[in-house]
Image (cartoon, rainbow, N blue to C red):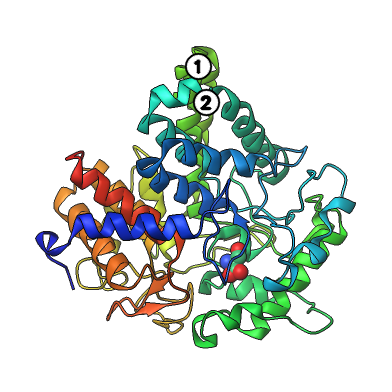
Amino acid sequence: VTPDPGAIDRELLIAEATRVLGQNWRGTYTVPAGGLYPHQWSWDSAFIAIGLRHVSPRRAQQEVESLFGAQWDDGRLPQIAFAPGRDDQYSPGPSFWHSERIAGSPATSTAGLIQPPNHAWAALLVHEADPVESERRRFLERAYPRLVAWHEYLRARRAEPSGLLAAVHPWETGMDNSPAWDGPLARVDGSFDGVIPRPDLEHAASSERPSDEEYSTYLYLAARYRDHACDDSGESTPFRVVDPGMNALWVRSEIALARIAELLDDSSAADRHRADSRVLASALESLWDDDLTFPVPVDALTGERLRFRSVSGLLTLLVPGSPRAEQVIDTLRSEHFGLGTTAMVPSSDLTADTFDPAQYWRGPSWFNTAWMIAVALEERGHVAEARALSTGVQALALGSGFAEYVDPFSGEPRGTRRFSWTAALALDLASRDAAGLR
Ligand code: SER
């Protein structure tokens, strides 16, 4: 299922993707999807900005700035910034979190959890799309202190002794029901007391969404974290995992902060960010598992390695100079991820017992991870494979109606449709191709 690059109608793709982003635009930010996700999501917005920069650099800047409006005093960028009046359309919503009752929360209503830190990377790409417009709006000057505070939150409140950041909820990893979390979730002794609202199932098939059992634990964990004022103490969570993908994005964003500091003529800050990124990159090596020859998450509460090949480990390819990158790429090509033989890259090991081609992060191929892997392969000189993957992303995005995720074998759409980051990242690849930038 490697589509022919010549067969993609790039003009049509760019026009259709732009239309999706226009439909999902809410004046200052973009919802991930009109029905299923009716608020602003953190890492979604960063990916969306990467696509929007080709349509309107100013809108791309606003997308990121809008999320900064939801930043907490401690620097955290929340997983979700809630739109007023849509409480019953998504669970858990503003009346679950009651963020206004928590000290240090912003004026706008938000979730208390976080998502992977891809924001500084996105901010730099947005700037580079139109440096003149960026300078005119003083975009980097205003974004930089926000991004520094965000990374400071991760360092002060989330870093383990290794220096790597820990997630306190599966939602924070962005890969909610990845089989990697099955073990740590099974040890969580608690479930949500009450009816489990599932408005999500009005917009996507239950066979393609996390189960009620999973949701019961998700809501229990979120309520407990909230009831401890989102303070990141040991009591606030019985779930704490160190995820390779989240940390790889942190490294990538720390490197982007160095570049942003340089553009702002602060060379000592740039040196500091670069040094920080090197410390993180070398700590990331501790996630390497010799048996699987692959980076795996660690349960920070038990120290146990969560020996599972998830697409998250492939995201370590985004870290420049990573010494084991070629081994990671070998695994990408192997029966576990089947690069070139499946549609894009599956979210989970194709050979695992848990593999399910329809179930959210337990098998389907997602467009954001494929985009990141295509970018990393290109940077590493695996140009033919990068372009084949990029072509796959573009063809499947258009062919699936901008699905949230697809079956890795058939490319059949799964989850919701007209999904913003699918449109944005396919648009990014198509625009790069059109500009001959690749
Ligand atoms: N991925 C979550 C959901 O499905 C939100 O972050 O609702």
Instruction: Work out whether residue 344 can be spotted.
Output: no
Is the residue marked by circle 1 packed among few (<14), some (14-19), or many (20+) residues within 10 Å? Answer: some
Instruction: Work out whether residue 147 can be spotted.
Output: yes
Quadrant placement of the C terminus:
top left
Q: Residue at x 73, y 69 (%)?
A: 92
Amino acid carrying label 2: it is Leu
Report the mark closest to the observer, 1 or 2: 2
Image coordinates of residue 421 in percent, x first then y, are 44, 57
Question: Which of disc 2 and disc 1 is earlier in sequence?
Answer: 2
Is the residue marked by circle 2 packed among few (<14), some (14-19), or many (20+) residues within 10 Å? Answer: many
Relative to residue 409, is residue 122 depicted above or below?
above
Circles 1 and 2 in contact, beta carbons < 8 Å:
yes
Q: Circle 2 is placed at which residue position?
A: 140
Q: Residue at x 85, y 53 (%)?
A: 229
Q: Tell me if the residue at label 1 has its CB under 8 Å from ligand 1.
A: no
Relative to residue 428, is residue 421 depicted above or below?
below
Image coordinates of residue 304 in percent, x first then y, are 60, 63
Q: Which residue is drawn at 80% across and 44% down?
A: 107
Q: In which quarter of the image is ligand 1?
A: bottom right
Residue nearest the observer in this picture, 2 or 299: 2
Q: Which residue is drawn at 55% across and 58% down?
A: 31
What count of labels does the image hold? 2
Residue nearest the observer in this picture, 106 or 306: 106
C-alpha distance separating marks 1 and 2: 8 Å
Image coordinates of residue 127 in percent, x first then y, are 43, 30
Image coordinates of residue 313 in percent, x first then y, are 42, 58
- Determine the secondary structure under disc 2: helix
Residue nearest the observer in this picture, 75 or 131: 131
Q: Circle 1 is placed at which residue position?
A: 264
On the rendered structure, is 294 left or right of 361?
left
Amino acid carrying label 1: it is Leu
Relative to residue 140, is residue 213 depicted above or below?
below
